[in-house]
Amino acid sequence: MGESMRKQKMKKILSLLAVGVLLLMSMSGCGKEAETGKTQVAMIVKSTESAFFKSVFAGARAAATEYNLNVTFNGPESEEDYVTQNEMVRQAMEDGVDVIVFSAVDYNANAEIIGQAAQRGIKIVVIDSDVNSSMVSCRIGTNNLQAGVKAAEAALAAGEDELYIGIVNYDVNSANGQQRELGFRQTVEQDPRVKDITTINVLSTTEDARAGAKEMLLSDSRINVVVTFNEWTSLGVGWAIRDLDRGDRTQVVAFDSNVVSVGMLETGEVDALIVQNPYAMGYLGVETAANLINGQTGGPSVIDTATTIVTRENSGRARRYCSLLKRESNYSEPHSQNRSFRAILLLMWLLRRISIT
């Protein structure tokens, strides 16, 4: 495609996006509240307490209002508890839901119950964390292999002549963490400065990641780069760096963003964040569920919600983004102000998808 044609196409897309945003911002009274009665969609995720999944829920509630769907939200207390998550899927089956929007704790251990739900005619939409099933209608979330590549690029920005890397990963049965580590390793292993890579796996909690990271750093003083792959482990690593006063001599690359992790970016415990778009995952998950309920087939089987690298230099943008998501997380009823926030957040995702930002 020639440059002039490309510019014309981009202008057309931007015009359409702008019209869409204006419509969303002006439709303060057009969305219907979900009617009481039969639940149509069950959203079952890995946790209900993290900032990440609160943002997922905010996006999902927005879509539920737009499409007039009843949606329930559930998840275990621990991101390791696939047993409870399986029971939640079983309960959704008994409730007779039409669609389950699912984020798997365990790629393999959740597979059987998801297969049983699909065999009953329930449509399955996966967001964020995949499950080992061929019966999923659509997978929505981060391209985790590419996210690992981005983490590697941020880690390799360290100006040292020799790099000794420590990886703090979470559950080995999580597809997300393993894919991110794979993409990371495939990239950094091509750099001759990388002399050694040490990996530890911890529970997906701040406390366990903090303790594991401290032990790793104390056992090998050569480690000058630390990488971790989700919200809870990122906070734990940041606290460990602060506890050991290692901020000035350790390049830290972490995942996801909340007020605390962005603060760590600004105070030096973290050097880069690989930021996902959980709001889009929630919104698009419920939107896809609505399409399936309405009999629409032939849509994309995979939707990449993209990631971006946030550093100290552009952390102000991340803080503003966190502020928007925090306000959206408190959203419960449709009104014009929240619609404008949703329009802005979704526009950010759309622009990133067509590589304009």
Image: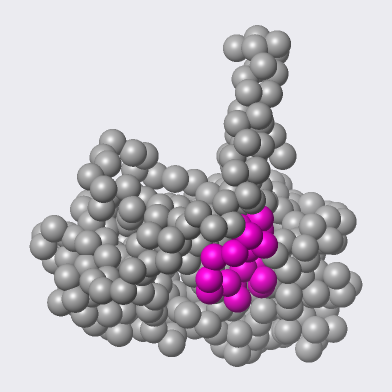
What type of secondary structure mainly makes up the magenta span?
Answer: helix
Measured as percent of width and height from the top left, residue 177 is found at: 49, 64
Foreground: 290 or 195? 290
Q: Is residue 70 left or right of residue 314?
A: left
Q: Is residue 223 visible?
A: no
Measured from the top left, where is residue 278 in percent x and y? 55, 61
Choose between 144 and 88: the one closer to the eye.
88
Q: Is residue 305 above or below residue 3?
A: below
In this view, 54 is above or below 255: below
Quadrant in which the C terminus is drawn: top right
Q: Is residue 265 left or right of residue 166?
A: right
Q: Position of residue 246 (x, y in %)?
A: 83, 78
Q: Is residue 65 left or right of residue 253?
A: left
Q: Residue furthest left?
A: 120
Outermost residue, front side: 29
Q: Is residue 20 left or right of residue 32?
A: right
Residue drawn 65% across the image and 43% down it = 22
The magenta stretch spans residue 328: yes
The picture quadrant where one finds residue 1 is: top right
Along the line of sight, the residue nearer the viewer: 306 or 148: 306
Q: Write the residue at 66% across / 72% down.
A: 326
Which residue range is magenta in the image? 325-341
Point 80% across, 69% down: residue: 265
Q: Is residue 172 visible?
A: yes
State the image quarter where residue 259 is shown: bottom right
Q: Residue 66: x percent and y percent?
A: 45, 56
Instruction: Count all numbered tags in the image, as a single digit.
Output: 0
* Vertical side of 33 occupied by 267: above or below: below
- Asked if residue 205 is among those painted magenta in the image, a careful observer would answer no
